[in-house]
Image (tube, rainbow, N blue to C red):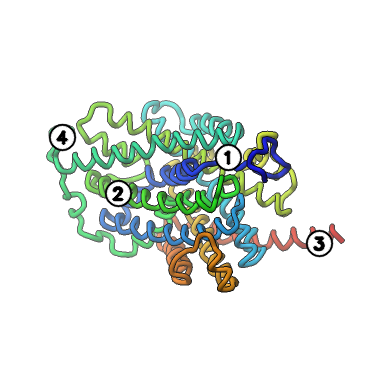
Amino acid sequence: MNKNTSAVPENQFKRSMKTRHLIMLSLGGVIGTGLFFNTGYIIATAGAIGAIIAYLIGAIVVYLVMLCLGELAVAMPETGAFHTYASKFISPATGYTVAWLYWLTWTVALGSSFTAAGLCMQYWFPQVSVWVWCLVFCVVIFLLNIITAQFFAESEFWFSIIKVITIIVFIIAGSAAIFGFIPMKNNLPAPFLHNITEHGWFPNGIIPIVMTMVSVNFAFSGTELIGIAAGETHQPEKTIPLAIKTTILRLIIFFVGTIFVLAALLPMKQAGVIKSPFVEVFESIGIPYAADIMNFVILTAILSAANSGLYASGRMLWSLSNQGTLPKCFGKLNPKGIPTTAIAVSMIGGLLALFSSVIAPDTVFVGLTAISGFAVVAVWLSICASHYFFRKQLSTSEIRSLKYKAPLYPLVPILGFILCLIACIGLAFDPEQRIALYCGIPFVVVCYIAYHITRAYQQRVNR
């Protein structure tokens, strides 16, 4: 499509996203509910050292997956790319299932994000129910997504800037408090590394590290938005590799640095999901209004992640419709190039938040993030497999002509696949997260059956 064209051809997106938008879109999807809320659950389950190790392994996994995705996305930049790659290089039924899994990832993540945002608001307004705030934020995020893709990208850019600055300030201020440069509240002594070493290296053994891997991967989910946005990105062959490189580097620094500070300042038995561990940490530091400021920034961060999530889930439904596996209404774009119907249907995750926040926001929250984490890890499995089969079918000259090549093939896709598989198996050992397998596996089976039914119906209609 000519980049100077002002009108949007039917069923085509504008390539309006620049490198800075893509980097911040990916960071925006990642730095959200998983980091600001799930870290408390991970520290409480795996211990301080276990949590740090789990996040280091998670960083390696996401880097391997992104290397695979980078090669695929540069070779074939398409909106809603994952299921297209899976359809071409694994099977059409797998591609269909991957699309629905990724849609499930983000619609369920919307539910957990809105619930977390409601919990943030209860910090200031304890008398107002969580579901009221969920409803308000559903409307706000929906409006941000249906104006224009450029407006969405710009709003997400500034959302993410706030989050990145906050994480940097948190790591610096937290490190200063650990070693006594900033006083603790009530004249408590500086903790140094006491909270990290108090319960030993692995207080609950090695198994909890494997158990929490899906939660860690849920926290890292969002990096793959680079592949989703490839079809709306200017010069993808230059933009995507740069976005992958800078995003992964920043994530390792942000996540590992943040977990270290949290683990040092937050006793293991105090960690949980009712309140963000970030707020708990700043409540213990003697800086006036620090906890209020952090709570506001976390609220912004969570809404930013929800903003990215609705974008991703809407584009995935559009992509399914564009390939003929969903009704055409999901594939229609408004004059501004926005798939309004697909976005509206994807807001079902927001309604799920209303339900979960009324029933039991603390226990249901962990279940929601586990289901979302399972779905995204399943998608990552498909990305690794797609890359393996994609490269395998290329001739030597075709491999040389690739504009971006993942290194160490076939080690990268195979290792990425194995680590993702281990993370899924780890869910079976955690009673709180096991629901992800009970929901996720039947969902996959239903998707495969639905594909074959719809395919048979289409063939009958086309005769």
Lower sequence index among marks 2 and 1: 1
Q: Amino acid at mark 2?
A: Ile
In the rendered structure, are the residues bearing label 2 and label 1 in contact, judged by CB atoms less than 8 Å apart?
A: no
Q: Amino acid at mark 1?
A: Ser
- Residue at the spot 54% in from the left edge and 63% down from the top edge: 402
Q: Nearer the viewer, mark 2 or mark 1?
A: 1
Where residue 21 appears, as percent x and y from the top left, is 49, 41
- Residue at the spot 30% in from the left edge and 59% down from the top edge: 53
Q: Can residue 340 be seen from the camera position used here?
A: no
Q: Secondary structure at mark 1?
A: loop
Lower sequence index among marks 4 and 1: 1
- Residue at the spot 65% in from the left edge and 58% down from the top edge: 96
- The residues tagged by marks 3 and 2 sit, at their Cα atoms, a distance apart of 53 Å
- The residues tagged by marks 4 and 1 sit, at their Cα atoms, a distance apart of 47 Å
Where residue 164 appears, as percent x and y from the top left, is 37, 40
Residue behind mark 3? 459
Q: Amino acid at mark 4?
A: Pro
How packed mark 4 is, by other alpha carbons closer than 10 Å (few <14, some 14-19, many 20 or more), is: some
Residue behind mark 4? 183
The quarter in which the C terminus is drawn is bottom right
- The residues tagged by marks 3 and 4 sit, at their Cα atoms, a distance apart of 71 Å
Residue behind mark 2? 259
Residue behind mark 1? 16
- The residues tagged by marks 2 and 4 sit, at their Cα atoms, a distance apart of 20 Å
Q: Amino acid at mark 3?
A: Gln
125 with respect to 51 (left or right)? right
Where residue 453 appears, as percent x and y from the top left, is 74, 61
